[in-house]
């Protein structure tokens, strides 16, 4: 099968078999880890194998890149040492100062980096509510805007940006659209199919799924000078993922489809049940019909809505922190997408300037029994004093939409 042609197989099959990865020499079903840092030259001093040096070339890394590119419907993909390395490399590869339009609510570490990028790259950045198409169009600077960066669903407010609509605006301005699709993964959303030019993942999260790898990935719709420059940046800065990390990532991706479907089912059940709790003022989850962007989610997400959601507490920050302190099955930790269910008070983590409300708890649903997860949350929520229920759902919803 031509690796550049669409596969007739479903994603679950492609992932379970890792595109047929194995070892041709030994006929081992499990692929080996190619650890070598250097490669033998041919007699004519060339490299017939195609591999030159470990900082740019590795067979294990390339196998993972092929899997990601196939899943995304991309022309090519690159694996990086972290999600931040993947995202920042795209901007480090820009050949001239560029105006960047970015979602207001994105991963806080990358938002902080974008805020600083003008100081050493000469770029300018406009943070915009990308769910507001009029605001996005107004932010365009003709002849200057070169990249749109959106994260959808937004973390941790879970608003949805219409990828196809933003792609139309971006391309009309002669700009590229980059989508951080870490939360959805290609199992749920394939941004390139909606017009995106570049897709970025923190592979640390759902792609790996076991909280034991730091990695990132970038996939592109087609080859371009920017893509070639990004490849050069990775090689020059040494941003490639290590071979063992790539192997662990490939192993984790084999169960991505199964994991994410189960996590999505659990998240939906939890979101529905918690919506009625007296201490909860709002549940933010795209799968809920009451969600402000549910129609976009139905169009853009493939029949499921992911394992992430947030709850907002009527009692404000104190109630949120209390609930996080009382859970036992849920683990208080940063990150998401693993088999363990995690809960976190994001405003405390992100600090001053965060767009995250102080009454919000972010939850990443793992693979535990959903009833155990629900019972644990209900026990914690029931410990919130009724006197702390001072906020109304309508007030919270107004804040989310503003």
Image (cartoon, rainbow, N blue to C red):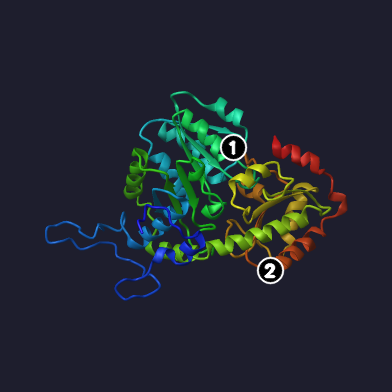
Quadrant containing the N terminus is bottom left
Label 1 belongs to which residue?
104
Position of residue 228 relative to residue 309, above or below, is: above
Percent of width and height locating residue 311: 72, 51
Q: Is residue 100 visible?
A: no
Q: Which residue is mark 2?
A: 369
Q: Residue at x 50, y 60 (%)?
A: 10
Q: Residues within 10 Å of mark 2 (few under 14, many from 20)?
A: few
Residue 125 x/y as whole percent: 50, 32
Residue 399 in the image: state x and y as whole percent. 73, 38
**Which is nearer the eye, 351 or 44?**
44
Q: Is residue 210 shown left or right of residue 6?
A: right
Residue at 53% across / 48% down in the picture? 181
Q: Secondary structure at mark 1?
A: loop
Quadrant (top left/top right/bottom left/bottom right) for the C terminus: top right
Residue at the right extreme?
A: 387
Q: Which mark is residue 79?
A: none
55 and 188: which is toward the camera: 188
Q: CA distance from mark 1 to mark 2?
A: 35 Å
Nearer the observer, disc 1 or disc 2?
2
As drawn, is 262 to the left or to the right of 377? left
- Residue most toward the top? 142
- Give the mark count: 2
Judge by depth and name the residue closer to the eye, 173 or 232.
Answer: 173
Residues at discs 1 and 2 in contact (Cβ within 8 Å): no
Query: Closer to the N terminus: mark 1 or mark 2?
Result: 1
* Residue 266, image x, y percentages: 68, 61
Q: Residue at x 40, y 72 (%)?
A: 30
Q: Tell me the quarter of the picture where residue 363 sits.
A: bottom right
- The answer, for residue 41, to whether it is visible in the render is yes
Q: Residue furthest left?
A: 44
């Amino acid at each position: 099968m031509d690796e550049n042609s669409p596969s007739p197989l479903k994603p679950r099959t492609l992932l379970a078999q890792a595109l047929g990865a194995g070892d041709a020499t030994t006929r081992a079903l499990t692929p080996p880890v190619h650890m070598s840092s250097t490669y033998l030259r041919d007699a004519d001093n060339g490299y017939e194998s195609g591999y030159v040096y470990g900082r740019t070339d590795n067979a294990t890394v390339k196998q993972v890149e092929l899997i990601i590119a196939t899943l995304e419907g991309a022309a090519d993909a690159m694996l990086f040492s972290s999600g931040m390395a993947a995202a920042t490399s795209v901007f480090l590869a820009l050949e001239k100062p560029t105006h960047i339009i970015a979602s207001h609510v994105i991963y806080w570490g990358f938002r902080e980096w974008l805020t600083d990028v003008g100081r050493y790259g000469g770029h300018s950045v406009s943070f915009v509510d990308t769910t507001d198409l009029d605001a996005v169009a107004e932010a365009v600077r003709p002849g200057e805007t070169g990249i749109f960066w959106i994260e959808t669903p937004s973390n941790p407010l879970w608003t949805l940006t219409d990828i196809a609509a933003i792609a139309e605006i971006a391309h009309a301005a002669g700009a590229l659209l980059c989508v951080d699709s870490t939360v959805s993964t290609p199992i749920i959303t394939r941004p390139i199919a909606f017009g995106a030019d570049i897709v970025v993942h923190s592979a640390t999260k759902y792609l790996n799924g076991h909280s034991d790898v730091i990695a990132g990935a970038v996939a592109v719709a087609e080859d371009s000078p920017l893509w070639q420059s990004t490849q050069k940046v990775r090689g020059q800065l040494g941003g490639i993922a290590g071979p063992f990390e790539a192997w662990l990532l490939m192993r984790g991706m084999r169960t991505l489809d199964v994991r994410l479907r189960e996590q999505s089912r659990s998240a939906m059940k939890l979101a529905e049940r918690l919506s009625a709790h007296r201490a909860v003022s709002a549940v933010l989850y795209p799968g809920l019909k009451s969600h402000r962007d549910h129609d976009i989610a139905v169009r853009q997400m493939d029949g499921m809505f992911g394992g992430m959601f947030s709850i907002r507490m009527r009692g404000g920050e104190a109630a949120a922190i209390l609930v996080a302190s009382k859970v036992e099955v849920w683990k208080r930790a940063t990150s998401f997408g693993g088999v363990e269910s995690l809960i976190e008070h994001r405003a405390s983590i992100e600090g001053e300037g965060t767009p995250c409300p102080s009454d919000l708890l972010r939850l990443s649903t793992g693979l535990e029994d959903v009833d155990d997860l629900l019972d644990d949350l209900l026990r914690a929520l029931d410990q919130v004093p009724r006197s702390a229920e001072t906020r109304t759902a309508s007030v919270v919803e107004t804040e989310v939409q503003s």
